[in-house]
Image (tube, rainbow, N blue to C red):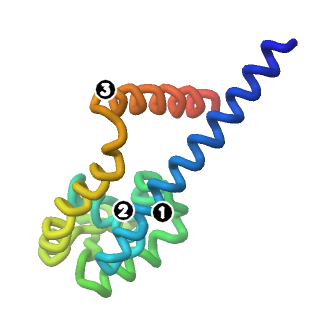
Amino acid sequence: MRIMEAEISQSLKLFIVLSRAYRSVNENVNKLIQTYGLNPTEFAVLELLYHKGDQPLQQIGEKILLASGSITYVVDKLEQKSLLARVACPSDRRVTYAQITEQGKKFIEDIFPDHAQKIHELMKELTADEKDQATELLKKLGLSIENKK
């Protein structure tokens, strides 16, 4: 029984450390994103469209882990800033795509190198091998949890 208690305690400690590390990284990245005049969700949508191309509005939420009800609001804001446009699907009237505009592409191309560099600076405490190890371990953990659903 003592081994079980020690393992539970270890799992709780890992959860707390992981949560605090995520919060720290996330807060720093969110502050950076705000300096670009975007909120984190707007940035995530724009970055998705830039790197993955046009996306059906209905699928954006699951790709950036956002509730679908919020997508319309975010897309409206980015459209008002002329960073993306809605484009009707030619083969299915029920589907509308979000498409990054030329202005949106230029915007991301201007800010992304700085963004990537700042994230790299946040992660500098870990060696390349430690980053690989952390990536593999966290992927293993996440996938094991997803498979239990």
- The N terminus, quarter of image: top right
Say which element carries label 1: helix
Numbered circle sitting on residue 44: 2
Numbered circle sitting on residue 27: 1
Q: Which residue is mark 3?
A: 129
The picture places residue 36, in percent across and down from the top left corner, at 29, 76
Crowding near the residue tagged with mark 2, few <14, some 14–19, many ≥20 C-alpha atoms within 10 Å:
some
Q: Residue at x 24, y 55 (%)?
A: 116
Q: Is residue 1 above or below residue 142?
A: above
**Amino acid at dot 3:** Asp
Q: Is residue 128 above or below residue 30?
A: above
Residues at badges 2 and 3 in contact (C-beta under 8 Å)?
A: no
Q: Nearer the viewer, mark 2 or mark 1?
A: 1
Q: State the CA–CA distance, disc 1 to disc 3.
A: 25 Å
Q: State the CA–CA distance, disc 2 to disc 1.
A: 15 Å
The picture places residue 121, in percent across and down from the top left corner, at 29, 52
